[in-house]
Amino acid sequence: MNENNNESNDTNFNNLDLKPIGFINCKQKERYEAPRQGVHAKDNKGVIKLLPHQNFEQAVQDLDGFDRIWLIYGFHLNQGWKPLVSPPRFLERKVGLFATRSPFRPNPIGLTCAKIIKVEKLKIYITEFDLLDNTPIYDIKPYVPYSDSFPDAKTGWLIPNTNIYNIIITRTAKIQSDFLAKNCNMNIENYVKVQLQVDPINETRRRIHKSDQYFENNQLFTLNFRTWRINYYIDEILKKVYILQIRSSYTLDELNNVEDPKKDKEHHRIFVHKFF
């Protein structure tokens, strides 16, 4: 009898059909904009919009009494997975997928702990999250410190890096990034925060390169973003990264070659004409 019940339960579970209870709206849209950890994304703000006509208005009752919630969600932009992966900033060897938080998983399901700002009917306003716009939300549970926090737990191969840098966008870089956001739909500011908040001088990361130039006696670095280059320097004492400017990776000769079919060159031509 028990065996038959188990078989029946297994069959039901194998046919489990997960359906979103809602979706998140936020300004982060591309995978490169997703923070490494939500707790470091203090500026992130978004709203979970629960689906109507599901009695979710009652389901969120009393949720606003909690500071944080667990979100079970779907990696809606990812496909495929590998059993061994190379985590960012760990170069010694590949590690098993289940020993990482890689978003490429056999079942594209994620878990994150977000901070509640407020709850208004079917809308849950949150911050400190690592989700992207239109991420499907499958479930919500309250974060309970006495049972969910284990600060002395071992972390295996992972050495936590609490050395977080503050990103400073200078006036020039701000004007340039706003221009690209408006005209090219590129959120470079988010990309910079994700890439440079931790370990911003590690040249073993393919996107970072040390320059032979200096700015006010500070060594310059370059962060690559597609066909764009972001110049910055670091104040190690204050733990600050100063973003100086954004520039095109194309030379003037390459931009003047109108026969080149690359579609992004028109954006670069407009940008260079405006700022250089």
Image (cartoon, helix red, strand yellow):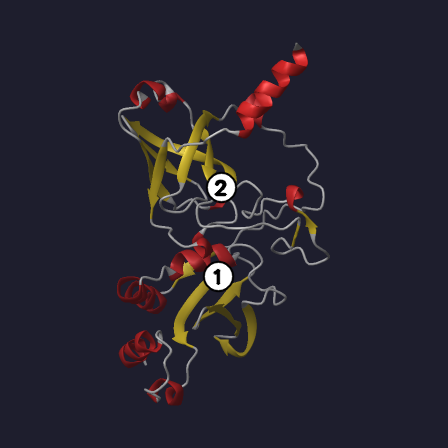
> Would you place residue 134 above or below residue 274 in this image?
above
* Residue 167 visible in rendering: no
Please state if 191 lies on the left or on the right of 121 as rendered: right
Q: Which mark is residue 115?
A: none
Q: Measuring 35% from the left and 62% from the top, which residue is drawn there?
A: 186
Q: Measuring 42% from the left and 59% from the top, which residue is drawn there?
A: 168
Front residue of 193/80: it is: 80
Front residue of 5/28: it is: 5
**10 Å crowding of disc 2: few (<14), some (14-19), many (20+):** some
Residue 219 appears in which quarter of the rendering? Answer: bottom right
Residue found at the far top of this picture: 1
Residue kind at label 1, given as amino acid type:
Val
Which quarter of the rendered picture does the C terminus lie within? bottom left
Question: Mark 1 and mark 2 in contact (Cβ < 8 Å)?
Answer: no
Which quarter of the rendered picture does the N terminus lie within? top right
Front residue of 184/161: it is: 184
Residue 45 appears in which quarter of the rendering? Answer: top left
Q: Secondary structure at mark 1?
A: strand
Which of the marked residues, 2 or 1, is nearer the chain's N terminus?
A: 2
Return the x and y of residue 128 as percentages of the image width and height: 43, 41
* Residue 191 visible in rendering: yes
Q: Secondary structure at mark 2?
A: helix
Residue kind at label 2, given as amino acid type:
Val
Q: Measuring 55% from the left and 48% from the top, which residue is drawn there?
A: 104
Q: Which mark is residue 241?
A: 1
Q: Which residue is mark 2?
A: 39
Labels 2, 1: front one: 2
Return the x and y of residue 260 as percentages of the image width and height: 37, 84
**10 Å crowding of disc 1: few (<14), some (14-19), many (20+):** many
